[in-house]
Image: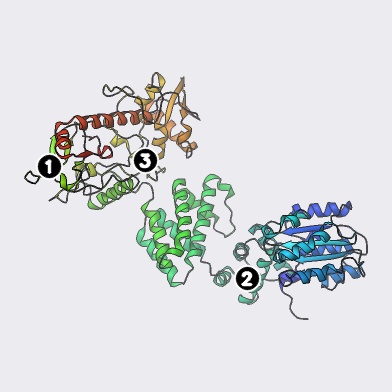
Amino acid sequence: MSYQVLARKWRPRLFREMVGQTHVLQALINALDHNRLHHAYLFTGTRGVGKTTIARILAKCLNCEAGVSSEPCGVCSACREIDEGRFVDLIEVDAASRTKVEDTRELLDNVQYAPSRGRFKVYLIDEVHMLSGHSFNALLKTLEEPPAHVKFLLATTDPQKLPVTILSRCLQFSLKNMLPERVVEHLRHVLAEEQVPFDEESLWLLGRAADGSMRDGLSLTDQAIAFGNGQLRAAEVRAMLGTIDQGQVFDLLNALVANDAPGLLAAVAELAEQGADFAGVLAELITTLQRVAVAQVLPEAADNSLGDQQRVLELAGRVSAEDVQLFYQLALHGRRDLPLAPDPRGGFEMALLRMLAFRPGTLTHTGPTAPATELSRQASAVARAQAATPAPPPQPDPEPVSGKSTGVSQARPDSDTQRPAAQPVAAPAVVAAPAITEACVDAATVTDVPAPGETRSGIQQSGQSEEPPAWLQEAPPDDDFEAESEDQDVDVSQYMDGWEPAEPAAPVADTADETSDLPPATGLAARWLDIYPDLGVAGLTQSIAAHCQLVAVEGDHWRLHLDPGHSALYNENHRLRLQNALVELEGRPLTLEVLVKAPDQETPAVAAARRRAARQRQAEESIQADPLVQALITDFSAQVYPDSIRPIDA
């Protein structure tokens, strides 16, 4: 007897032999056992999930000589002939090859005749969505009111293409994709019965490659047995599928965690020598990062399907949850953009280098004597911040003229034709403001910063030395991606010089914050404004503390309200860090409770934003009142762009 492939040999012949699809089987079994049968059934789902198999078992249940039930005998002539595909009253139609209306009419001409041998005449129409519109119209009336001896079983992988008139006349059952766990479980049973040696990792490789299809899983297993000369080994299955060794994925992740760019590129070079599919490598990287994230939240849930549970747990303990989420998101974007790259390897390398470049905690403040590499990192942070700010209208390049005021502005004539011929061209006002030191509480809001090589007014200086200007050396680190691990948090406390209590720093007519109508802090809320700068927290924890309000102090129990608009990334780790910081600051044990609730008084972030807005208004009023600026406007019809005015810090 010739060899029969596993997908055909192990095709279920009874409902109880089916793997999965319990929601469909339960409905059919109950209908058969209680004689509540519909005249038309529609089975939908992707390839290889059991649509045609269920339809054939249902036809066997309807025509078994032992009677209609959910357990056909399997030995009568009707059951055997249906299993062998030669039962005369089971008419199987491939709609993909019989799409014309003439084919459908020819099929329906025989509907009125009684079955030859069975109890019911069953029409099994596969890929029914391929029928033409006229064919569907010819089928409608018969499908709605067929003779009592006729049952229609329709199967399709694309139910969206079926007319609603067809869908309304059928009982629709949607079959689900097979989980890798179910595929592996079934493969384990099949290989044990077939007496084929295998290892566990090879089954999981096949289960994932099946992509939800049991038939594809069995077909790939057949191929892997032939490739492995009668046995399944992970290395051979991986070579057949074109996947990479899981150890290489961990090499990439270890290099990322260690910020080891040379090691990372060396690992990529090794993959390139092996002819790896870089899109597949990114997919494996994403899968592993997902397993690491699960292990961080629930270590006991880390699976050992690939025999690497210990490596997953070890990596989960060395990398912060924020880094894992960042790597995962950048890997997803890298996989999406990979087809756009000129070279797959280059696109893969850029995805990994992007993970290194944007990883939190890589930028640190080093002061005026920072090395060139650190200054370049700070310049990159400033450039990224400036990219997020709309550029002001284009302006000419006049020479700076010093003056005395409290802000920075750019003024220019409307056109060259308005300049007097005999009078030298006046330069725009670049004026310095008194020192008003106001540290930014939320580093993510610092976006309007001049780019490297520019002054505060955005004008290129001639003959500038290679030493970066003071404002660049003092630029706060970019917090687009904020660190969480204790050893990688960016310490922003060094930029808190000049922190002020809740009361306004200077008498301003309107001290309300432009973005908030919260009243100034009093009582416990004001006490939190005083405590906040001394907490010593950094990164996202600092940002969360800046958006909190102290509402209750009951002995050793403190309660904070966290602004809901800034609570998306809040978790228990942040509460513990704030509690530890308060314990160290107060010098006594205490417990901290953080509730996500809108504050009713100013938080540190709102207070700082209010003061920044007040300083901005002071700078604008100072520019408008500056005699030099007024002379430029009067004499040369110059204009002052409000967006170009910035308060100057000491």
Marks 2,3: beta carbons within 8 A: no
Marks 1,3: beta carbons within 8 A: no
Residue beneath the point at 19% across and 29% down? 625
Instruction: Check the image and name the residue furthest to the bottom.
Output: 1
Q: Position of residue 375 (x, y in %)?
A: 25, 49
> Label 1's element?
loop
Q: Nearer the viewer, residue 212 or 504?
A: 504
Q: Is residue 649 left or right of residue 597?
A: left
Q: Nearer the viewer, residue 579 or 374?
A: 374
Let me know if residue 13 appears in the view: no
- Say which quadrant the C terminus sits in: top left
Please state which amino acid type lies under the numbered disc 3.
Ala
> Label 2's element?
loop
Q: Is residue 395 left or right of residue 324?
A: left
Q: Earlier in the sequence, mark 1 or mark 3?
A: 1
Please state which amino acid type lies under the numbered disc 2.
Leu
Q: Earlier in the sequence, mark 2 or mark 1?
A: 2
Q: Residues within 10 Å of mark 2 (few under 14, many from 20)?
A: many
Quote the CA–CA distance across marks 2 and 3: 53 Å
Q: Residues within 10 Å of mark 3 (few under 14, many from 20)?
A: some
Quote the CA–CA distance across marks 1 and 3: 38 Å
* Rendered position, 53 above or below 532: below
Q: Residues within 10 Å of mark 1 (few under 14, many from 20)?
A: some
Q: Which mark is residue 444?
A: 3
Query: Which residue is the site of mark 2?
Result: 232
Q: Position of residue 217 (x, y in %)?
A: 66, 66
Residue beneath the point at 46% across and 56% down? 333
Q: Which mark is residue 426?
A: 1
The image quadrant of residue 85 is: bottom right
Please state which amino acid type lies under the numbered disc 1.
Ala
